[in-house]
Amino acid sequence: EAGVTQFPSHSVIEKGQTVTLRCDPISGHDNLYWYRRVMGKEIKFLLHFVKESKQDESGMPNNRFLAERTGGTYSTLKVQPAELEDSGVYFCASSRYMTEVYEQFFGPGTRLTVL
Amino acid sequence: KQEVTQIPAALSVPEGENLVLNCSFTDSAIYNLQWFRQDPGKGLTSLLLIQSSQREQTSGRLNASLDKSSGRSTLYIAASQPGDSATYLCAVRRPRNDYKLSFGAGTTVTVRA
């Protein structure tokens, strides 16, 4: 079974530019989550999809961040326009739905650097 | 708001010694707790998940205990090896309808050959 995959692995952009991160969850996992770790801080929750619906977006920092999950498969996280403080590692995770355990499996992350 | 603390922040031990990693959380009303391993520049690998109703979970040389009432979990790694060098993170999930994980800052472990 393939794990969670993320693309790109690294992205370096200028302040004010737009970047789109992609996440492909484990096949059959209806729950999809975005997290990020900014410099020196803990990993923080951004949002949670159940299939194509946003279940919880309480961790999204501001309206420069837009997450989508069309068709309930892969998800994208767009940052527009990017600011210096958006630099960090963005992780995607997935888990099964309607199960007792809800173990979350994480992807390798996308390292975003905003110059 | 759930706060998760991991002590120590870093640990260096000689090969063969047992490792004890601590995790504490402020809100005891959790659904489960996960321990992860992260290698430099890599993603998170799930090691063990303990449901709130369980006291411990074991996988090979790893054993994780949970004392929900006191807000603590401990990860034990027996007979450490250089390959165990990594950052270990604990994360807690709140009750059933809140899926987000709250992470600690991690403990960076170095096992010296």
Image: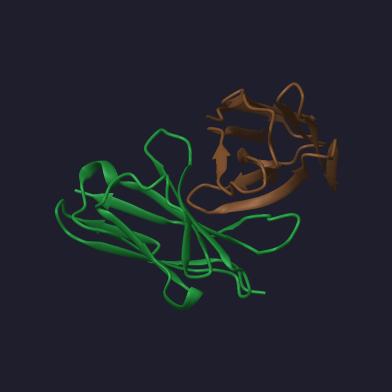
Chain colours: A green, B brown
> Which image quarter: residue B9?
top right
Q: Is residue B68 above or below residue A58?
A: above
> Could you tell me if residue A77 is visible in this image?
yes
Residue at x 63%, y 55% (from the top left corner): A104
Q: Position of residue A109 (x, y in %)?
A: 46, 56
Q: Position of residue A7 (x, y in %)?
A: 40, 67
Q: Quadrant of the C terminus of chain B?
A: top right
Q: How many marks?
A: 0
Closest to the observer: A55 or A8?
A55
x%, y% of residue B58? 85, 44
Residue at 77% of width from left, 44% of height from top? B51
Residue at 70% across / 63% down in the picture?
Answer: A98
Residue at 63% from the left image edge and 53% from the top image edge = B45
* In this view, B106 is above or below A28: above
Q: Where on the picture, by quarter, is residue A80?
A: bottom left
Say above or below: A98 vs B37.
below
**Horizontal and vertical percent position of residue B46:** 67, 51
Judge left or right: residue B70 versus residue A93.
right
In this view, the residue in front, B105 or B112, is B105
Vertical placement of residue B75 versus B96, above or below = above
Q: Is residue A73 visible?
A: no
